[in-house]
Amino acid sequence: MTHLQTFLHMGGYGGFVWPSYAAMGIILFVNVYSPLRRFRRLKGELRGKL
């Protein structure tokens, strides 16, 4: 095995570690994107009412 394969395999736990990182990345993205989208939508609605 190369060093990269060994790193990705993580001693047999790579199948648990990498999906956990992917889930964390998706959750972080949603936690940032969702409030920004809502803020922009509400700001647009307020502009229309003024």
Image (cartoon, rainbow, N blue to C red):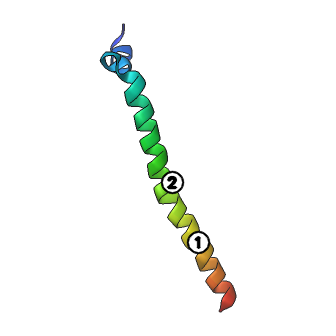
Q: Residue furthest bottom?
A: 50
In the image, what residue type sits under mark 1? Arg
Mark 2–mark 1 distance (CA, rounded to whole Å) = 15 Å
Residue 40 got which mark? 1
43 left or right of 6 in image: right
Quadrant of residue 15 within the rendered picture: top left
Q: Residue furthest right?
A: 48
The location of residue 9, given as percent across then percent down, is 37, 17
The picture quadrant where one finds residue 8 is: top left
SS at circle 1: helix
Which quarter of the rendering shows the N terminus?
top left
Task: Identify the disc placed on residue 26.
Answer: none
Judge the density around disc 2: few (<14), some (14-19), many (≥20) Cα neighbours within 10 Å.
Answer: few
Q: Residue at x 65, y 80 (%)?
A: 45
- Residue drawn 34% across the image and 16% down it: 12
Classify 42 as above or below 14.
below
Which of the 4 image quarters holds residue 11? top left
The residue labelled by disc 2 is 30
